[in-house]
Amino acid sequence: MLTVLRVHLPSEIPVVGCEITPYVLLRWPDGSISNDDVPESAPLNGYCMRYKWYRNLGDQKVAVCSVHPTEQATLQCLVCLKEKVPIAKSYHCTPRCFSDAWQHHRSLHERAKKAANENGTDEEEIFGRFNSSSGSGSFNSGLSSIAPNLLQSPGLNNDPISVYPTTVADKSGEAWSEVARSRTYTPTADDINHVLKFECVAVDVETRIPAGNVNTVLTSRVIPAPSPTPRRMVPVNGDLLGQLDLDGRTSSGTFSVLSYNILSDAYATSEAYSYCPTWALSWPYRRQNLLREIIGYHADILCLQEVQNDHFEEFFAPELDKHGYQALYKKKTSEVYGGNSNAVDGCATFFRRDRFSHVKKYEVEFNKAAQSVTDVAMTAGQKKVALSRLIKDNIALIVVLEAKFSNHGTDNSGKRQLICVANTHVSVHHEHKDVKLWQVHTLLKGLEKIAVSADIPMLVCGDFNTVPGSAPHALLANGKVEPLHPDLAVDPLGILRPTSKITHQLPLVSAYSSFARMVGVSPGLEQQRRRMDASTHEPLFTNCTRDFIGTVDYIFYTADSLSVESLLELLDEENLRKNTAIPSPEWSSDHIALLAEFRCKPRIRR
């Protein structure tokens, strides 16, 4: 007989839009133990599993804070009611919460007023849909204003509910409404502030009679998904009055590139990020939050790092395909990693099919490059030592794309506009400065070969695990490393000698250094400058945890063929919620996304 041994939930707090998959441990008729499902369509020895989900109807509905959805609201913004901002966004838990969020909150008033003046634009298009039909507590404040198309309808991913009984009562007299008959369930806006109940039992396929006790587990109250403060694109000409909303529209002849380390689930542990609630670290929650954020940027090209192999195939590739993106992927080599092969992460590059077509793909495996280096003039003993230091499984993915748009106003008619995009994740080992520099130099020499064969603009994106002013950053930004740079002192294998060979000829410039070169005295410009390091012309941070805060992510471009039009505004401590680090319920990676809009420069006839 099929028997249920144990049932538990993966997270203590259910979140709207995030699928719940209970862990159900079964003892099969042959005595073996498994958590595999036994659906009615594939019974086992005449038995199958029956699942039901219920919503508690006796829960008191209370308003929750729009910034901290686990907290009950204690105050409401009356201006929001006047300007017809969705009611869910008008609530705050404390005066301090309202004060800290005021800069973003005020923009909601402005956007609602603007929407009302623009031919009665539907508020759903501006703020996302919400449901207020059941009282002040029944709404979806977690639905991101930048991606209303991702909103879940009440029956999404759950079995149809129209055939279910309206209510049932348990032994204590509490009323429950049946909402699904499936193993998994995705909470909806109607579930906010309600407790959910999951039931499972093995049943006889013929008689439909339960073969044992019904196993029940309750959730905490469902909360709306927190939404990060929206970030805007800032023109680099200093005219911040022309600030661009992320509405998916790009100027004629321009294209945008995103670089984002999304934090692999394998690394997102409670031990590493003890300050983040466990429910916000769970992959079902983070993947939806990351997808909402990424889609909301409307970038033409996406360069993502730390994308697990299984997550690429099962989630990101199919989900982003729905939004018009074609996917390319390179998994890290696994000579060092000894765990589950599906958990190996890598670099994923996506591009919009309506903007680009794929021309060519190059894969760079630094392990193979290490083999080539050590094959030259090294004894067997020296080679073993060298390989143990150089082999780190890091890779780079280089993609050549052809633009389907043209640069209006330039004399390039009839000529293909190619763009080369490199996406990489450099070694994280801080003590191996020589390895970092060697990997970056190896990548750049490969890009030089492509540049020689074609007149092509280049972008070099990724997590370089190296701070501004380090030798790898100097090589990228200046084309060389000064002989007396302190990082060059770490070279036990002699792979950096002579130092005069650590150069490249690509005219690379960091996209975000454009903020430092901007002219003007507007408050917005000064705000961005305060978030930049004046000495290195890089952001103060792109990685922010309790143990480290600094810049390790970059977008470099060839300045002779590309110009920066606008940049995604940088974050500060206020944006990340004061006195906290990331990941957090609002931001699902320990890195922040970088996004730059570029224009191809006219080609010079030779």
Image (cartoon, grey):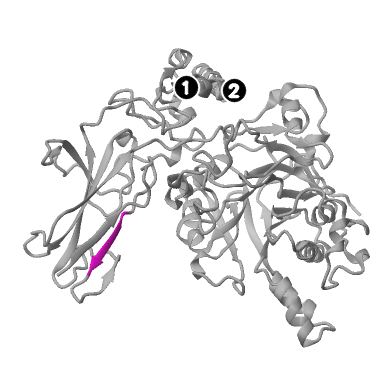
Q: Is residue 255 above or below residue 386?
A: above
- For disc 2, the marked residue is 103
- Vertical side of 527 occupied by 537: above or below: below
In the image, residue 44 sits, relative to residue 589, either above or below, namely: below
Q: Is 283 placed left or right of 591 in the picture?
A: left
Q: Which region of the structure is painted magenta?
A: 22-27
Q: Position of residue 456 (x, y in %)?
A: 78, 56
Residue 489 at x, y = what percent?
A: 87, 62
| Residue type highlighted by circle 1 | Thr
Indicate left or right for 100 with 440 as reference: left
Residue positioned 44% across, 35% down in the render: 143
Would you place residue 118 above or below residue 34 in this image?
above
C-alpha gap between disc 1 and disc 2:
16 Å
Q: Is residue 14 left or right of residue 604?
A: left
413 and 190: which is toward the camera: 190
Q: Which residue is mark 1?
A: 94
Q: Residue 505: where, in percent of width, then height? A: 88, 58
Foreground of the two, 378 or 512: 378
Q: Crowdedness of circle 2 by 10 Å Cα count: few (<14), some, many (20+)?
A: few
Q: With 253 as the anchor, is 270 left or right in this view?
A: left
Q: Residue at x 32, y 49 (%)?
A: 157
> For mark 1, does the 10 Å Cα neighbourhood hold few (<14), some (14 to 19), or many (20 or more) residues?
some
Residue drawn where x is 33% and y is 23% of the image = 136
- Residue 504: x and y, percent? 86, 60
Image quarter of residue 332: bottom right
329 or 464, which is in the foreground?
464
Residue at far bottom of view: 380
